[in-house]
Image: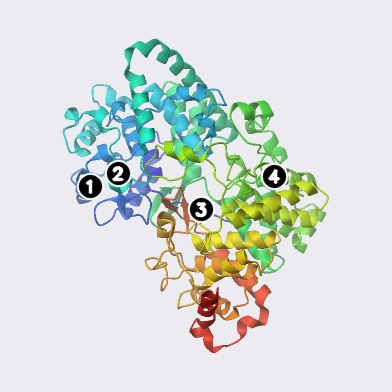
Amino acid sequence: HLAGDYGGPHFLLPGLVIAWHCMGRPPTVLDVHQRRQAAIYFKNHQQSDGGWGTHIESPSTLFGTTMCYVASRILGAPRHKREMVMARMFIRTHGGATHTSSWAKFYLCLLGVMPWEGHNPVPPEAWLLPDWAPFHPARMWCHARMVYLPMGYLYGSRYVYGGANEGGKDALIGELRNELYVEPYDSIDWPATRHLVADIDNYSPISPGMKLAQNFLSLYETWWPLGALRHTLRSAGLRYSLAYMRAEDAQTNDICIGPVNKVLNMLCAYHAADHNMGAPEVRRHAARVADYLWVAEDGLKMQGYNGSQCWDTGFAAQAAADGGLCDEFPAFARGVWGFMERTQILSTEVSAETPAAKYEEYGSRRKFYRHVSKGGWPFSTSAHGWPISDCTGEGLKAVLRLTDAECVAKGINDGSLRPIGTQRLEDAVNVILTLQNEDGGWATYENNRGFGWYENLNPSEVFGDIMIDYSYVECSMASLSALAEFRRRYPAHRAAEVDGAVHRGRAFIRAIQRPDGSWYGSWACCFTYACWFGLEGLVAAGEPTSSPSVTRGVAYLLARQRPNGGWGEDFSSCYDKSYAADGMAAYGDGGSGAVPTAWALLALAAADCREEAAVRRGVRYLMGRQLPCGDWPQEGIAGVFNRACGITYTAYRNVFPIWALGRCARVYGDALDRVVEDDDTGAPAAAAAAAA
C-alpha cells in the first residue's frame, strides 16, 4: 500500500498526551523517544503570536492553544520558557481557558484542571431512549456518536485524574490551574462558564435551543429530588456505554473509528479496569496507539485516522490503470492487488476468524447500530473494520481495473496472487447499494438516520455539520461510478437495482450543483476537488458531455485557471464556503498547486473538454512542477473534515498528477504537443468561460 502523512489537526496528539498522563504515564502508551518527538512537534508548530491553530494552516485558536499548551507542559516544557509565556499570554488575552471550546474543556476536566461543573452535561443515559426517539444518539453521524459515547461514560463517572484528587500530589495540576485562567482558580463561578466560548473558537455557535437543553440537563444533574431516579438511569447508561465501547473495540481490533474515541475508549477501559494497566483490555488498547502515530520532519504527530492506506492505494491503482502503467510496473500492480484483496472487510479467511466477525450478525449490528460491513473497503486497513461508501467504491473500481492487467491475471492464474471472486465483488456492490440515501446520494459510513435540524443540537462549537451523515458529491460519485463499472462487466447481477441506484445518484449530483456550475467539497480543498467528483460522476452515470450540468461545471473550472496554467485553492475555500480568491498563495506556486491542478485536469478530461489550449497549459504546469527525483513538491494542506479542520494527504502530491497526466495523454493524445499562441495567454479558457 501507499503510506503517507495523515496528520494536521492539533487537538489529537494533546488528547493522547493528557490521557497518557491520567493513566500514570505508562511507557507502553508513549515511550521516551515518542515523547521527545511529540515535544518537538509542538515546538515546531507554535505560531509567532504564541498560539497554535486547530490545524497546521489555521490561525491560532484558543482550542488549539489550550490543548497544545497543556500537552507541552505535561511533556516537560518549563512554565518560564519563552514559548510557554507567549502561549499563556495568548490564552489569557482571549479570556482564559474558561472561554475555550467544549472539547478542550472536556480534557481539562479529565485532567483535573477544571471541575465538571464548568462543562455542559453529557448524560450517558441518553442511550436508554427508545430507538424511535428523535433525539436518540444512534441517529448521529457515527464519528460524532462514537466520540460522545466515551465522553458520556467519563462525564457520567465524573472521572478525574487521580493525581488531581489525592491531596494535590501532582504539582503540575496546581500549576496549570494557576496558569490557564485570568481569575484565581478557586474564585471562578464554574457553572456560569459553561456557555462561554471565545470568538476565535466559535465556528459553529451553539443554538439557543441547544443552550436551553443544556441548561435543562444541568438542572437534572443537580436537582436533589431526582437523585434516586438519576442514579438508577445513570448506572444503566454507564453499563450500556461500556458494553457499546467494548463492541466498538472488538469490531475495530482496538483501533476504534478515529483518534479521539480511540484515546477516550482507552481511558474508559483503564477506568473500568480499576486503573490497572495490566488488564487485557487496557493492554490491547495500548498496543494499538502506535497505529495512529507518524514521525515526519516536524516531529511525532497523531494522525486523523490510523492512516489513509486503502484510500490512497485505490486511487493509485486507478491512476496507473488510466495511464496504461500497470504492466509497465508489474511489482506495483501485483502488490496493490494483494493489499486490496487482504483489505476487503470480513472477506478473507483470516478476518472471518477475528472477534469482529461475530458482530456482523444482524442482532449484534442492530444492538450497536452498525451498518453491514462485509464486502466493503475501509479508508485505512481491514483491521479498522469500518467500511465507507466512497472507499468501497474506489476499492471496487481499483480491483476491477487491476483485473485488466496481464501481470495480475497471470498471478491469479498461477496461484501467486489470491483471487477476489465474484461473490466478493457482489458483496461490495451490496454494501454500496444499501448505503444509498433516500435523496439519491451517498453518505459516508451509514445511511442518514437523522434530520437537518439536528445541526441545531451540535454542541462542539469548533466543527460544522457533524450531527448526521449527509449525502456528499464525493461519496456519490465514487459509489455510482463503481456501480456503473461493475454493471459494464457483470450486467446480470441485480440489474434493476444497480440501474436505479445509478439513475438516482446522477439526479442527486445534478441537484446539488451550485448555480455557478460548481460543487462544494466536504473532504478536500474544495471546489476544484468537488468539480472533479461532480463531472466524473455525471459522465460515469451516462450524462452527455453536452448537457448543461457538464458544460457549466467545465466553464467554472476554466474560468479559474490561473495565469501560470495551474489551479489553486487552500483551506479557506472550505472554511468560508467560497472559492479562495488568492488560490494557494501561501503554500503553492504563483497561486497554483500540483494537486488542485491535477483534479481540474481529471475533471476536464472526464468531461471531454475541447478547450485543448487550457488543458495543454495545465499539463505543462504539472510537468514543470515535477522534481528531478520524480516526486511533486509537498504544498499546502489538501484535505478537510467537518468544514473547519484541515488534514494532510501527502500521497496526493504524486498520485493525482500521475493520474491527470496519464488520462490527459489518453484523451487528448498528440493535441497536447501542439504549440498555439493562445497557450500563453489563457484566451481560449477565458473565452469559453465568458460564453458559458
Q: Upstream in the sequence, badge 4 or badge 3?
A: 4
Q: The residue tagged with tag 1: helix, strand or loop?
A: helix
Q: Position of residue 443 (x, y in %)?
A: 58, 46
Instruction: Give the vertical position of 592 relative to 79 (above or below).
Output: below
Along the horizontal axis of the image, is 34 left or right of 73? right
Report how far apart the C-alphas of labels 4 and 1 lie in the structure.
53 Å
Q: Determine which residue is flagged by label 2.
A: 72
Q: Determine which residue is flagged by label 4.
A: 433
Q: Upstream in the sequence, badge 3 or badge 2?
A: 2
Q: Upstream in the sequence, badge 3 or badge 1?
A: 1
The mark lying in front, picked from 3 and 1, is 3
Report how far apart the C-alphas of labels 3 and 2 lie in the structure.
30 Å
Q: The residue tagged with tag 4: helix, strand or loop?
A: helix
Report how far apart the C-alphas of labels 3 and 1 lie in the structure.
34 Å
Q: Upstream in the sequence, badge 4 or badge 1?
A: 1
Instruction: Give the vertical position of 333 relative to 291 (above or below).
Output: below
Q: Residue 523's mark?
A: 3
Q: Position of residue 322 (x, y in %)?
A: 67, 66
Instruction: Give the vertical position of 176 relative to 613 (above or below).
Output: above
Q: Could one spot residue 418 in this view of the protein? A: no
Label pair 2/1, CB-CB below 8 angstroms: yes
The mark lying in front, picked from 4 and 1, is 4
Label pair 4/2, CB-CB below 8 angstroms: no
Binning the other alpha carbons within 10 Å of mark 3 as few (below 14), some (14 to 19) or many (20 upward) gives many
Q: Determine which residue is flagged by label 1.
A: 84
